Amino acid sequence: MHARYRHNDMEHLRWLLEKHRSARRKLIVTDAVFSMDGDAARLLELAELKREYGAMLMVDEAHSGGLYGSYGEGLCHVLGVHRDVDVHIGTFSKAFGVYGAYVSGSQTLIRWLTNKARTLIYSTALPPHVIAGILRALELVQAEHEGRKRLAAASVRFRSALVNVGFRTESGDSPIVPLIAGDNAAALRFSEALDVAGIAAVAIRPPTVPAGTARIRFSLSAAHTDDELTDAAARICEIGRTLGVTAGE
Ligand SMILES: Cc1ncc(COP(=O)(O)O)c(C=O)c1O
């Protein structure tokens, strides 16, 4: 069976672990940076809980791999919890700009997956040219020290620009910046108006996010210049005002 804990709610997770204390195996699963909110998981507390309850920990670094750490090792590494992570997964389709994904863990885990994971066993392996692309991307991303710093700083500034004019968003330095629009129609109208203004940002609606929190999800890139982001923030504010999507809605 699986039980779902509330978003980043450690008390709720603890309560569930307590409730299922006698379960033979327990696996705590989390994103490192959440895909729809752009906030970071409470990895230190998750590592403590896993130890306390004899659970395993699985972390998806899809949105943090390549971005955090001197060489883009990811958030687990930066926070020093990588040794607590039993199943470490990530994708090469985001910061690495290629395709494919990885799982890393103990030899026993990898042997088990190789023999039991049907999605792996019954699908074609990545073609060699994709693997070559991944290997090259790993080299490039590791060396992108400046890009990482620039992107984190730009993400903080972009958030501030939105919050200063009264939008609701999550704090942090991840390049995923959600802007809560409220209902689905408002989010769609917003996204369409942004598109006309030359800003590509999709509307994310339930069930991908909780009801009543439809949002625009901006994804920043190290290739965006400061001027582009300042200009985009100004346009977003203007469009938001015109459509009546602003402070705390
Ligand atoms: C948290 C998370 N994990 C995994 C994936 C899947 O990545 P891919 O599309 O490369 O399979 C996504 C995709 O958006 C994601 O948000």
Image (cartoon, rainbow, N blue to C red):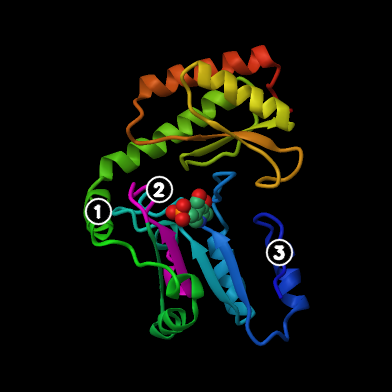
- The percent position of residue 107, horizontal first and vertical second, equals 38, 83
- The percent position of residue 42, horizontal first and vertical second, equals 57, 58
Task: Tell me the element at label 2.
Answer: loop
- Of circles 3 and 1, the one toward us is 1
What residue sits right under mark 2 in the picture? 94
Q: Give whichever of discs 1 and 2 has the lower sequence position.
A: 2
Mark 3 vs ligand 1: CB under 8 Å?
no
- Residues drawn in magenta: 79-99
Q: Main secondary structure of the magenta part?
A: loop
What residue sits right under mark 1 in the picture? 133
Task: Tell me the element at label 3.
Answer: loop
- The percent position of residue 231, horizontal first and vertical second, equals 44, 17
Q: Give whichever of discs 3 and 2 has the lower sequence position.
A: 3
Q: Which mark is residue 4?
A: 3
Q: Splitting the image into 4 quarters, where does residue 17 fall? A: bottom right
In this rendering, the answer to whether 135 lies above or below 222 is below
In 3D space, how far apart are the residues under numbered discs 1 and 2 (Cα atoms)?
A: 13 Å
- The percent position of residue 174, horizontal first and vertical second, equals 47, 43
Label 2 near label 3: C-beta < 8 Å?
no
